[in-house]
Amino acid sequence: MLKDFAKKHNKTVIMSIHSPNTDIWELFDNVILLVHGQMIFQGHRNEVISYFKNIGFECPKNMCPADFLMEYMTWNEENEVNFPVFFENYKSKIQDNIISHIDEVIHSEIPLKEMHTTFWYQTKKIAKRTLISMKRNPLLL
């Protein structure tokens, strides 16, 4: 339902889900994975498993990708040694691409619109705001 709404209205849906099942996982387009507030992956859902495989963490064939990821992202003494690997690989393999993509979008797709208002329009708005404030707080009189 949310995916249809997002596509129909050209909106972005942001959700925080701890451990979705496979059916829910398949509905995602893009995912952001965080460990201790730091990103370890940002990109298309279909790229997550191959990315982790390339850095040495292979998902078993019949395992839900979200369960596999949560297994390594959850804090415990055994996983804590993996966190620096995740952080470094994000910085070296993903972060620069994300930053350059954001810069591209900022400079190309978002037109800046200058707004000009007249002196009299601004004076009218300020006077109206002041009158409302004085009505609400008679001690200002």
Image (spheres, grey):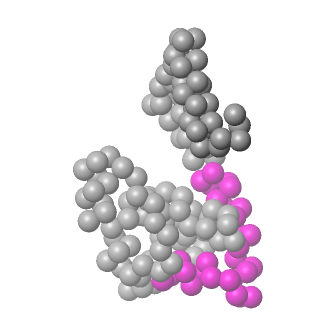
Give the image location of residue 47, x and y in percent.
Answer: 45, 62
Q: Image quadrant of residue 122?
A: top right
- The residue closer to the viewer here, 91 or 114, is 114
Give the image location of residue 85, x and y in percent.
Answer: 70, 69
Vertical side of 135 occupied by 127: above or below? above
Residue that appears at 74% across and 88% down: 77
Vertical side of 23 occupied by 95: above or below? above
Give the image location of residue 60, x and y in percent.
Answer: 45, 84
Residue that appears at 49% across and 22% down: 113
Give the image location of residue 52, x and y in percent.
Answer: 55, 70
- The residue closer to the viewer here, 69 or 38, is 38
Can residue 61 be seen from the camera position used here? no
Question: Which quadrant is the C terminus positioned in?
Answer: top right
Q: Is residue 81 magenta?
A: yes
Q: Is residue 59 magenta?
A: no
Question: Which quadrant is the N terminus positioned in?
Answer: bottom left
Residue that appears at 58% across and 24% down: 127
Q: Image quadrant of residue 56?
A: bottom right
Vertical side of 133 occupied by 86: above or below? below
Relative placement, left or right, of 56 versus 8 is: right
Vertical side of 61 occupied by 14: above or below? above
Can residue 39 be seen from the camera position used here? yes
Q: Which residues are magenta?
A: 67-95
The dominant secondary structure in magenta is: helix
- The residue closer to the viewer here, 108 or 68, is 108
- The residue closer to the viewer here, 5 or 107, is 5
